[in-house]
Image: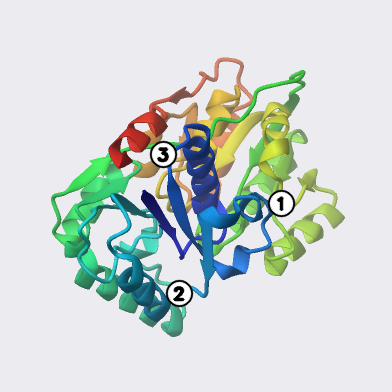
Amino acid sequence: MILIDALYVNGGGGKVLLDYLITELGSRDVEVLILMDKRIESDPFYAGLKNRVIFMEAGLRNRKEFYKARENEFNAVLCFGNLPPLRKMNAKVYTYFHQLLYLKIPENFSLKNKFLYNLKALILRTLRKNTDFWLVQSDLIKSQFQKKYKVSNVKVLPFYPPLKNEGETIRIKNAYLYVSNATPHKNHKNLIDAFCQFFDQKQTGKLILTVSENYPETVELINQKIGQGYPIENIGFVNRDQLAKVYRSAEFLIFPSLAESFGLGLVEAINLGCRVIAADLPYTHAVCEPSLTFNPLQVESIVEALLLSLHKDVKPAVNKVPNQIDELIALLQ
């Protein structure tokens, strides 16, 4: 039996990848047990898996007790939330690392958050010998992770759920889409300021955002700009069933994020035919050849990229990352 330890995954891109992995394992009749955060117990996807899921409060003590009681039941373990088991296992253990905050903590974080993530990084460093292999999504994350934590057993194994490309494609000319929540490193303020300056100059374009009500400061900024007459549309959180249609409605994906462990939105947009205007940062070049780039810290650089996008000779973006879900599942079996 395979254990998927996802106790620390309850949302965001990590859950998207987890749902995809569980679906693929289920379609291949692989015997699996999933350890899940109790906060998503009501999720219909996992509620339907019945006896293959164990929900519990996320925490080191509960996790330790679980492993102590069931350590001999598994042939392989995949820890999906950055931290290896709290004890050495007899089974082969793989740990999926995807949290950039364990590599570098932003300067604008509060003292409390800096303390918490430094503590988590210390825990990871303490537990790093309890996994046989680390799995990451790109060579960039591999090199950064190896440098900080002094480990050599790291495999690059990117995987991501393909979006169904069905239905008619009707792209809005000069529409710029950013599919992202609004945590600080996603850099919405610089993007919004740049788009408004661009629109002031050219009186063309539309900015489409996907910011939910969980980010009231960004929503307030968006509504303020809409009230001033800028063509910005915030469609809120978009589930994956609708996401392909959203990508097919835009001519460009614009991606100003300051840090990504992978950049799933870049891959999705390219696969669905968007040209990509992205931050000129290593994570971008690790996964694609973008159509245009900019300095995400400089509003004027984003404006310049938007102006260049109006030219007819903007090249298509190229995806550089294969989907290696088959290789991942083969590794676990």
Question: Rounded to the nearest whole Å, what is the CA distance between mark 2 and mark 3?
Answer: 23 Å
| Circle nearer the N terminus (2, 3) | 2
Q: Secondary structure at mark 1?
A: loop
Q: Report the residue at 49% width, 48% height from top.
A: 18
Where is mark 3, residue-wise?
284
Question: Rounded to the nearest whole Å, what is the CA distance between mark 2 and mark 1?
Answer: 25 Å
Under mark 1, the amino acid is: Phe
Q: Position of residue 283 (x, y in %)?
A: 38, 43
Q: Position of residue 46 (x, y in %)?
A: 61, 53
Q: Nearer the viewer, residue 257 or 244?
A: 244
Quadrant of residue 205 within the rendered picture: top right
| Circle nearer the N terminus (1, 3) | 1
Render colour scheme: rainbow
| Circle nearer the N terminus (2, 1) | 2
Q: Secondary structure at mark 3?
A: helix
Where is mark 1, residue-wise?
237
Q: Report the residue at 28% width, 74% height from top.
A: 123
Residue 277 sits above or below residue 58 on the image: above
Where is mark 2, residue-wise?
109
Q: How many marks?
A: 3
